[in-house]
């Protein structure tokens, strides 16, 4: 199944529970928009494009189920759902994009509850389908950047699980592999939630792409000793100048690649770009609960002393000068990003 | 107790088992040099100065116990012990230094077995005592570099546990704290073996120095947002030009600090310097078993897919241009390191 699927009969959103992979494969069922809020907040679903689509279905769930109230309070209900969904995670702008797009569909006050429900469901499904198409286009553009024989360092999970299907940066790597290029992936484990060690490794096993997991802090060793030719990661929000907010650790990885003349590519749909923000330091960075850092065990034993405190920023900002190119569904964008990124986004 | 202690009656070396801290405090008893080889290889004892001292006691154990053979095969036995100890871990040069110093003491062929045993034990104890004195001198030199109110990012464990007592980089921070300077430590958890989250946090609890554990990959976030004023780490081997091999991740940390104009200090005794090596790329980098990367659990569940592979370099090299100064027991050394480091080492 896909990362998220809509059940038209039961009016339910089905999510692969990404907290449990690869140890267990379980489905998390959302029957209310609040379920979707929980799923996004607790990272049952994660990845900027995937939470954009999940939030869209959340908006549909807010009004389409039998328990929904009358059409009188419909718009108030949608506004509340939008507010709660927007507050579930602050950094990925795709979330806001998905919610806004749904609000626009519901804007026509003359419509009946049933009409609006059907339109919202149809729109969420459209968002999901578009995501898959967008990702495939990105994959084709990005795959051209990969050489036969490349070893690629990849951060976090940007595969099918981070999107509706196919993925962003990992989709590029998968496309290169399917095109017959030999690639080897050094998978950053991606502390604290280990999306690399858990999810990216699991996907690469399925695609039969050779890989090795590394600790995030070891990427510098492989870059400095000439063992990696490319760095690929996704994005959670991109400012107008091409600064990229992405999973924490992307910045240090990009620094190490840049210091060793290894090109760095960030892959994202244009829905991840926030032209309202001039540069990356304006992007809100989520700080998550420190239990994510502390609740780690080796051989079943807790590692931190009792009462230990932690800090847990979930993202960081990679300044544009460290990035070689940005890969979107509209093509590969090169510097100067402040000029070429808005131009690409705004062209129709 | 200290990280390592010698029992004069039982002729045993006692080590705090650092694999189990902070969950359990247990003593690992070495009765043979082979026990010391295991202790170093399996990181029951770790930290360059601590394994230098442990290896010295290992040399003493090779000949001092009742089961030791005749003095005929004494020198052969010491050579075998030296070889096995040297092979236990390749990167930290203190290990070779400790073993060589012991071999020199045993060099006088005219001595009896009993004489040599006593001399070796005395020499190992001297090495241990000197380590504590050396560390205290380093701490005084380094503490002068810390300002009241500094937030310091620290990598791995460089405290009492990494030495016989007191520590290198963490000793500096402790001395600044004891001198009344307010310091806050951001503790790199230090994957894969989490010496930061386990050992450094445990030590800082005891010293009552405020700290927060961070994922290694989050240091860039704190540096780029101006939340840290200094970076301190130790060293496992330093080349003649001041390139520093240290726990994997030090390089990326130094890069992130350097990119944000935050000073980086490496703290080590002069016994960690290897003047035979012109630069850091000549330092042998240990690659450890990939189980250290893979055997990680969250909430008791394994995180990696079955059959997952990993790479596990234990160290990396920070090139000298990223380092602000080197702190040794002979004082603080500034660039140009290729000139000032050998000069400091060779002066008597």
Image (cartoon, coloured by chain):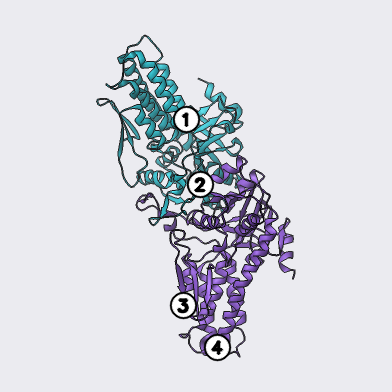
Chain colours: A purple, B cyan
User: How far is the residue under mark 2 from the one under mark 3?
Assistant: 40 Å
Residue for badge 1: B269
Q: Residue at x 43, y 21 (%)?
A: B101
Please say if A270 is above or below B115. Answer: below
Numbered disc 4: secondary structure: helix
Q: What numbered label is drawn on residue A31?
A: 3
Q: Disc 4 vs disc 1: which is toward the camera?
A: 4
Pointer 4 with pointer 2, Cβ within 8 A = no
Q: Earlier in the sequence, mark 3 or mark 4?
A: 3
- From the viewer's perspective, tell me whether residue B162 is left or right of residue B11: right
Pointer 3 with pointer 4, Cβ within 8 A = no
User: How far is the residue under mark 1 from the one under mark 3?
Assistant: 63 Å
Task: State whether residue A82 appears in this view.
Answer: no
- Residue B62: x and y in percent read 35, 23
Foreground of the two, B62 or B214: B62
Number of marks in the rendered image:
4
In the rendered image, residues at marks 4 and 1 fall on the same chain = no
Task: State whether residue A224 appears in this view.
Answer: yes
Numbered disc 3: secondary structure: loop
Q: What numbered label is drawn on residue A69?
A: none
């Amino acid at each position: 199944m896909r990362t998220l699927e809509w059940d038209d009969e039961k009016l339910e959103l089905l999510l692969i529970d990404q907290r449990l992979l690869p140890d267990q494969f379980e489905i998390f069922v959302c029957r209310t928009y609040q379920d979707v809020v929980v799923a996004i907040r607790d990272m049952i679903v994660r990845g900027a494009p995937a939470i954009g689509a999940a939030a869209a279905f959340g908006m549909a769930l807010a009004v389409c189920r039998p328990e929904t109230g009358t059409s009188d309070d419909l718009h108030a209900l949608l506004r509340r759902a939008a507010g709660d969904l927007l507050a579930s995670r602050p950094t990925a702008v795709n979330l806001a994009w998905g919610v806004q797009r749904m609000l626009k569909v519901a804007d026509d006050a003359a419509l009946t509850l049933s009409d609006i429900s059907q339109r919202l469901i149809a729109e969420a499904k459209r968002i999901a389908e578009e995501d898959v198409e967008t990702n495939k286009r990105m994959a084709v553009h990005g795959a051209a950047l990969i050489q036969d024989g490349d070893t690629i360092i990849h951060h976090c999970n940007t595969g099918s699980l981070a999107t509706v299907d196919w993925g962003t940066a990992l989709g590029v790597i998968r496309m290169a592999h399917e095109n017959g290029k030999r690639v080897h992936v050094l998978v950053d484990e991606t502390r604290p939630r280990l999306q690399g060690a858990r999810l990216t490794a699991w996907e690469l096993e399925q695609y039969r792409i050779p890989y090795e997991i590394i600790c995030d802090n070891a990427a510098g060793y492989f870059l400095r000793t000439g063992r990696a030719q490319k760095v690929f990661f996704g994005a959670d929000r991109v400012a107008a100048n091409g600064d990229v907010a992405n999973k924490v650790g992307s910045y240090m990885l990009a620094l190490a690649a840049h210091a060793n003349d290894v090109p760095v590519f960030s892959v994202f749909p244009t829905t991840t770009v926030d032209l309202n923000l001039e540069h990356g330091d304006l992007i809100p960075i989520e700080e998550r609960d420190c239990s994510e850092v502390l609740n780690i065990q080796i051989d079943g034993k807790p590692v931190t002393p009792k009462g230990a405190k932690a800090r847990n920023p979930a993202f960081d900002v990679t300044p544009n000068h460290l990035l070689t190119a940005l890969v979107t569904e509209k093509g590969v964008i090169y510097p100067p990003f402040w000029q070429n990124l808005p131009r690409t986004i705004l062209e129709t």
